[in-house]
Amino acid sequence: MRQNLSLAISLGIVLAILSVWATAGAKLVVAPGEQITSFNADIVVNPDATLTVTEDFVVHSEGSYFKYGFIRNLPIDDEARWDAQYAGKWTADNGIRVKILELTENGAPVNYRQGSGFGYPQLRIGPLNVPLERGDHHYVIRYTVSGALGPGSSRDTLYWNAIGHYWNLPVGAAHVTVHLPAGIVTGEVTGEPRVGGRGISNNRGAPPATTETIESGTAGVSYAAIGLQPTQSLSVVVSWTSGVVKKPSFGIWNRDKWYLAAPLALCLYYFSAWLAVGRSPKPGTIVVRYEPPAEISPAAARYLITTGSDGRTLAAVIAALAARNCISVEPHDGMYKLTRFAPDPGEQSKLAPEEASALNYLFEDGPITEISPSMSQENSARNSRYVANIQQDLAQRFGGIYFTRHIGYVAFGVLATFIMAFSLAATAQGRDTGGAFFMTTWILFCALILGAIVETGLLPAWKAVLRGTAGWIKLLPGTAAAGVFVFFFGFLLVKLSQGVSPAFALMVAALAFVNLLWAPFLKRMTKEGRATLDALEGFRQFLVSVEQDRLHRLNASSTEPAAELEYLPYAIALEVREAWGDHLAEAFFATTIQR
């Protein structure tokens, strides 16, 4: 039974492979009488260097050649534009783009699907994989073309292979007309028709093309040929004096430059929001204070001046616990051994909420713990968790009291960003729009996340490095990781530019950038927060001018009483220069900054 089943499966696989081979190797057979009865191409050269092309042709089918449905390959790729003299060196993507304006069969609109990538010129018209019915079929395709015109310093040139070379069918009669813009003098126009194709140097018995003159108010040329053999086509090369047809001012950005209206509209929204929230209170008069503001712990002081928490915040908390005689700190070989003392209810009652919480999670595994600089992944993750816990406690206590971020405005801006980007990605037209929606989603989401990390973490960290308050070596891993992401984003943007347009890719990048640029500007300090910051600055001046010598003495001696260390945590948090606190802070500086 198993042998019979295995044999049946093997036979099925072989038959499937043979079927695929047979389908792939099947050739399109031309039945007698099957042909392109007539083909008319009307080309209008617009002053903005685009073309408006109308193809009007009749196909006689016997149900043999078009047995997989009717396919029209527009003559826009370098396989159709094979003459290197006019089209340049062959490329997989020559930059020519089209937009279908109208497509009818026998006078009625018909469904079609446009290919992508290498199959971008392909239009599959009507039902898929269904033989084209016998008889005559009249098609009209109207579309715009950008990038096909060759503007020059003295003369502009249009090279157009009207029929292409994909149809292996005879053409009864072909006619190509080129209309030039008003202002071009007829006598300055030269034209040359060519009947042939790729690798074909003669007319195979077909009579030479005939030249006609357009009787209209504008200059142009018209060519006709009859009896074209399979793979032959009628090409035209038309040249005229430069000056009337203007090369697009924005170059490759011209076709979809309207995409840039989306980030401009988002920027206008954020500017309106910025005006609506008003200005932050101005700093008041700074008066030297001899003690910190009430209810403001060292970690809270750091939170207020940076609007977040970082490795220096963790160092300030550890120093505060040591000052309250809750722990001892012993630096050793770049690491810190923390030992928890027996609980002293009196001292512990003086701890700020974030310090009391830290006392628990720092010693969750026992009375002795070791804190290491965050160079390794394990230490970085643990120290970042400590900072995140401190940030959570501080945000619960002070969120909305001392400053507000106006998250509602930012959330609406991000929502509008995704709505605009998704809508434009879903309707985008280009050479390969299949992945536009996915790449747009991925780029926006990850760019906003990474941008927020860089904005709230790496940038403040590098500022501290430039100020000389932190070592730059510890920032290299995070900076390198951010660089890898930036490179990957750039790669995706290049693919998006090639698949849709450079303007679309720039729009996506600009939308993310506008959100990241404006979000910090909506943060506002409250009046209470401004007053507290002024008080902290007064206390900082006291530490700098009066207490500096005492701080140095504390650093030189490890036998000073804990009470004398009362202000050392504030010196760490407020970045007053002193060796022991700076070294402790540097140990955790590469820790992820929380905002």
Image: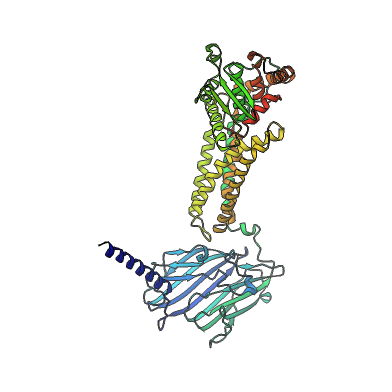
Instruction: Locate the N terminus by quadrant.
Output: bottom left
Residue 32 image point, x, y percent? 40, 84
Find the residue positioned furthest to the bottom.
205
When asked about the image quadrant of residue 218, the answer is: bottom right
Task: Give whichever of 489, 315 is nearer the camera.
Answer: 315
Direction from residue 440 to residue 13 in the image, left or right: left
Number of numbered discs overlaid on the protein picture: 0
Is the residue 167 above or below the residue 423 in the image? below
Residue closest to the eye, 416 or 489: 489
Q: In the rendered image, which quarter is residue 2 located in?
A: bottom left
State left or right for residue 1 relative to residue 106. Answer: left
Rendered location of residue 594, percent (x, y): 57, 32
Q: Is residue 271 visible?
A: no
132, above or below 227, in the image: above
Colouring scheme applied when the structure was drawn: rainbow
In this view, which residue lies farthest toward the left? 1
Q: Hey, which residue is sitting farthest top in the picture?
A: 346
Q: Residue at x 57, y 21 (%)?
A: 339
The answer, for residue 425, to whether it is visible in the render is yes
Please tell me which residue is depicted at 52% across the width and 24% down the height of the picture.
363
Instruction: Name the quadrant of the C terminus.
Output: top right
**Along the viewing direction, whichever of 83 and 237 lies nearer the viewer:** 83
- Picture coordinates of residue 488 (x, y %)? 58, 50
Residue 49's x, y, as percent? 62, 65
